[in-house]
Amino acid sequence: MPRIEQRALRDSYKQTPRKSGVYAIGCRKLDAVWIGTSQDLEKAQNRHWFTLRTGTHHIPALQAAWNKEGGTGFDYEVLDTLADDLAPLARENALKEKLAAWREKLGASLL
C-alpha cells in the first residue's frame, strides 16, 4: 500500500469518534460482574481480553476467575454511553455518576 494511502487511513482512524461510557465484564458461570469506564469502549475490551489471556490483568479476582474458567463464559457488555458533544469535565462527571449508578444496580466490583 502506498505511503499516501497509509497516511490517509491513519488520519481517518484518528479522526473517528470514540464512544465513551460504562462497560461490564461478566462471568456467567461464577455469577460475577466487574464494571469500569472508558473514553474508548472498543479499546477497553481489547485491553482487558489481552491482559487476561496473558495473565497480567490488574484485578486479581478477575484474573483468577478467568484462569479458573479458561476464558469461557466471559462477556463484555456496554452498559451506557455518553453523548459525543460533552465537554471534558462534564464527560468525567457523567462517567463517575453512571459508574456509581450501575455499580449499585448490579452489585458489581470495580475495574
Image (cartoon, rainbow, N blue to C red):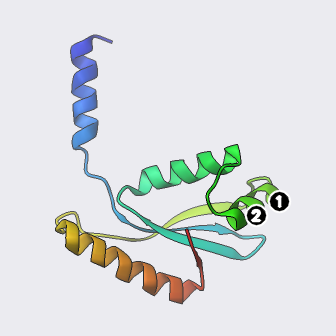
> In 3D space, how far apart are the residues under numbered discs 1 and 2 (Cα atoms)?
5 Å
Image quarter (top left, top right, bottom left or bottom right) of the N terminus: top left
Q: In terms of secondary structure, where does tag 2 sit? A: helix
Task: From the viewer's side, name the closer residue of 99 and 13.
Answer: 99
Q: Is residue 46 above or below residue 83?
A: above
- Looking at the image, which residue sits at the far top? 2
Left or right relative to 7: residue 61: right
- Which residue carries the number 2 mark? 65
Query: Number of numbered discs present?
Result: 2
Assess disc 2: are there few (<14), some (14-19) or many (≥20) residues with their C-alpha within 10 Å of its C-alpha: some
The residue lying at 25 percent from left, 51 percent from top is 17
The x and y percentages for residue 71 are 74, 54
Image quarter (top left, top right, bottom left or bottom right) of the C terminus: bottom right
Q: Is residue 16 above or below residue 25?
A: above
The x and y percentages for residue 107 are 60, 86
- Looking at the image, which residue sits at the far bottom? 104
- Which residue carries the number 1 mark? 68
Q: Quadrant of residue 60?
A: bottom right
The x and y percentages for residue 81 are 35, 69
Left or right relative to 73: residue 103: left
Tags 1 and 2 touching, CB below 8 Å: yes
The residue lying at 83 percent from left, 59 percent from top is 68
Q: Is residue 48 above or below residue 29?
A: above
Assess disc 1: are there few (<14), some (14-19) or many (≥20) residues with their C-alpha within 10 Å of its C-alpha: few
Q: Amino acid at mark 2?
A: Ala
Task: From the viewer's side, name the closer residue of 102 and 89.
Answer: 89
Q: Quadrant of residue 27?
A: bottom right
Q: In terms of secondary structure, where does tag 1 sit? A: helix
Q: Quadrant of residue 80?
A: bottom left
Q: Is residue 98 above or below residue 104?
A: above
Q: Amino acid at mark 1?
A: Lys
